[in-house]
Image (cartoon, rainbow, N blue to C red):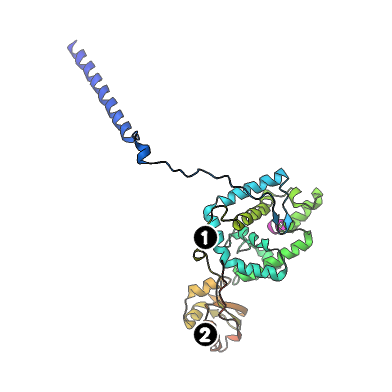
Amino acid sequence: MFLKIIFTALIFAAGMYTAAFIDSIKGAHTTPQHSPQTYPQSTSPVAIDFSFPETLTLCGEPVPLEDRRVWEMLDREFHITVWDRAQVYMYLKRATRYFPFIESKLAEAGLPDDIKYLAMAESALLTYSLSKKGAKGPWQFMTLAARSNGLRRDGMIDERLNFERSTIAALKNLARLYDKFGSWTLAMAAYNSGETRVRKSIEHQGTHDYYRLNLPLETERYVFRIAAIKIVIENHRQYGYELSPAQTYRPNRYDAVELKLRKTLGLVGLAQAIGTDYKDIKERNPQFLRDYIPTGLHTVLVPVGYGMKTVDYLKSRSGTVARVTLVISDREPIDIH
């Protein structure tokens, strides 16, 4: 009987100790009653209901937003874009570097200025961009499309990576697609999925209206993504994006040297001879896949002020260079506001 009383007392004491221990743990992780004053809650809104304009044109063509299906497609791409804060900031930073050249070539060719947003949709203006399918460069050319549009692509040269060369080729291709299909929305769709697929879809479905065609989802979203990027970039302050000129990327400046080589020319030796480094020459000329320039006719970009040094060095290479010309020297920077 005495042992039973002791055993019961021990069990009771153990229970009391366990309860006290649990309470102490809870107390350590429980916010005290005065915590709202100690840790005030943020007054910022959780989300903002951003909206896009009630009317919209893309490349001068109206987007039929009165069609609810069209409105919802744009609504999806708009919200994906406007809430991708880091990406939009990078769009704005890179635009000041690359848009001036694209805009000048569009104006020369008489093409719509909105086409520049296609490059953003394709590569985010990353000149070295590479897709899972093998498309490469700022305009995301596949190998066959690159060659058919005049870009060199082999084991030594890949002009898809050359911003200026690939831009000229892309605009020529888009102009050709517009002539073929008669609308910029169809031209952009064909740029994305191929003109054969778009042509067959038009013939099979009996409509020439991009917004009424049933196309692969990627292609259907493509034009709306370009439109969404246009809306956000052109109205970035309205959507909360503030960027001072000092935070943007300046246009590239360079001297351009045209040369015709009888023999290959090492990039390391060229860089050292003119007083710069291999990395500088390589990044200015990403189309050269090896550490040398192959034989033939090429344009090489060097730092501003190094053009004549390059010409003098190449002229000293007896038997290597057939011809060398300084094409552009000391290009003035383009002011972006």
Q: Magenta stretch? A: 188-193
Can you tell which quarter of the image residue 223 is in? bottom right
Question: Which label sits in the foreground, 2 or 1?
Answer: 1
Q: Picture coordinates of residue 155 (x, y %)?
A: 60, 70
Q: Position of 307 compared to 118: left or right?
A: left
- Look at the image and tell me in which quarter the C terminus lies: bottom right
In the image, residue 276 lies in the stretch drawn in magenta: no
- Is disc 2 surrounded by few (<14), some (14 to 19) or many (20+) residues within 10 Å? some
Quarter occupied by the N terminus = top left
Vertical position of residue 259 compared to residue 220: above or below: below
Residue under label 2, please give it: 309
The answer to whether residue 309 is above or below residue 252 is below
Cα distance between the residues tagged 2 and 1: 38 Å
Type of secondary structure dominating the magenta stretch: helix
Could you tell me which residue is drawn at 72 percent across and 52 percent down? 63
- Residue 129 percent location from the top left of the image: 57, 61
Q: Position of residue 22 (x, y in %)?
A: 30, 29
Residue 178 relative to residue 85: left or right: right
* Rendered view: 150 above or below 226: below
Label 1 belongs to which residue? 243
